[in-house]
Amino acid sequence: MVNAESASNYITDDFSSDMVETNYTVVSQSLSSPYYEGEPVIIRPTEQFLAVDGTQIEQEVDGYVGAGGSSAAVRFDIHDCGVVTVEAPETARYYVSMDYLDAGNSVLPLELSLKVNGEYQFYELRDLEFEAVWRDPEEKSFDRYGNQIVPMPDKVAKWQTKYVMDASHRHSRPLAIELQKGANELEIGMIEGTMLLGEITLTREPAIAEYTGSGKAEGQEMIVIEAEEMAERNASSIRAACEYDIDLTPYEVDTKTLNTIDNASFAEAGQKISYEFEVEKAGTYYLAMNFKQSEKADFPVFVNVEVDGEIPNSAFYNYGLGYAKGYQTKTFEDGEGNKLSLDLEPGSHTISFTISADPIRHVLEGVDRIMGGSIT
């Protein structure tokens, strides 16, 4: 075993042979074990935990109750390291999710490494990211001239659940880890930040429903969400901006008013913005967006759309937003030009947009192979 400080000294050359030859795409193709199809397996780290370097167990954590009923957590500070023993019901590939809380003050996401039975099963496990939640203050901010200014966001102490994901966000789906039947050791090393770790769950692949067509939206109800009024985002750098464009609301001639998302701040795969909205009348609704995508000429930007924390169906997965030099309002459509719809019940809902690089992952990995000398 190694401590987290030495674990953080992983190879940083993006085009290293290690990254090319042992990345998730390559390794997953070489595995023969089946994907797990059973019931979720919940692990309480505080009951099956061995501290290697640092770490503290907190038996009663305010505001946390895991799916298995635990309210205890393990505290990891930077360079801490520990091992959790998990019992796998069969030899298979599992999807691993963790309950966590970012308990530090850094603007950077949590970073940790994960060894499986003493080894990095694939390259991506050397550096995993677990993002915090950021919100703007409720009160808007103005300068002395009456111009609205971007406020300093607040970091929210909020428990979250996240699957083991690729920190480069080339894969927009969770990464499967192969475990042998019986006892397995997950060695967690803290590279950046302070984390409270709650329950760990082994599951089957989280499914996305297949798209089978859309219903027709009836009636005149319309729900308008202002892009600059984000409920949450997963990076402090994502911010609103002002553009003097009559196709945007709100629009003021003589003062600056935040009315869009700064495209330079929302441009990286894995970045996520979320909105809250109210539905008064149950029904089928179309989804439309007023957007400009002028950075990638003749090439789409891909987003994953989640409603109430889930992607509604495969049509909302890696949805392409085409090149648009100016702002345009576009209704989401399927591959045959049919409008995509959502069935919504009355009450509060959330909608989120996450930038995805998954559709071009094979191109990026091909470039890695060329730059790493694997292709001549």
Image (tube, rainbow, N blue to C red):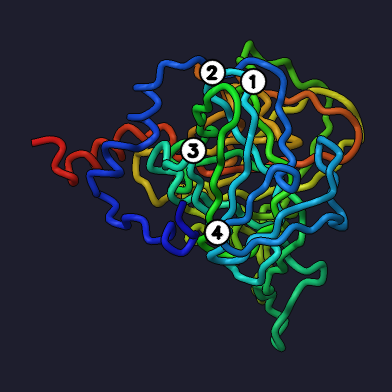
Above or below: residue 169 compared with residue 136: above
Q: Residue at x 36, y 22 (%)?
A: 29
Q: CA distance from mark 1 to mark 2?
A: 12 Å
Label 1: state its secondary structure. Answer: loop
Given this view, does label 3 or label 4 mark the residue nearer the observer?
Answer: 3
Residue 278, numbered label: none
The answer to whether one can see residue 134 in this image is no
Whole-percent x and y of residue 208? 62, 22
Q: Amino acid at mark 2?
A: Tyr
Q: CA distance from mark 2 to mark 3?
A: 19 Å
Left or right, residue 362 beside residue 105: left
Given this view, does label 1 or label 2 mark the residue nearer the observer?
Answer: 1
For disc 3, the neighbor class at 10 Å (few under 14, some 14 to 19, many from 20) is: some
Q: Which residue is mark 1?
A: 89
Q: CA distance from mark 2 to mark 4?
A: 28 Å
The answer to whether one can see residue 78 in this image is yes
Given this view, does label 2 or label 3 mark the residue nearer the observer?
Answer: 3
Residue 190, numbered label: 4
Q: CA distance from mark 1 to mark 4?
A: 28 Å
Q: CA distance from mark 3 to mark 4?
A: 17 Å
Q: Amino acid at mark 3?
A: Asn
Given this view, does label 1 or label 4 mark the residue nearer the observer?
Answer: 1
Q: Which residue is mark 2?
A: 35
Whole-percent x and y of residue 68? 82, 35
How many numbered marks are there?
4
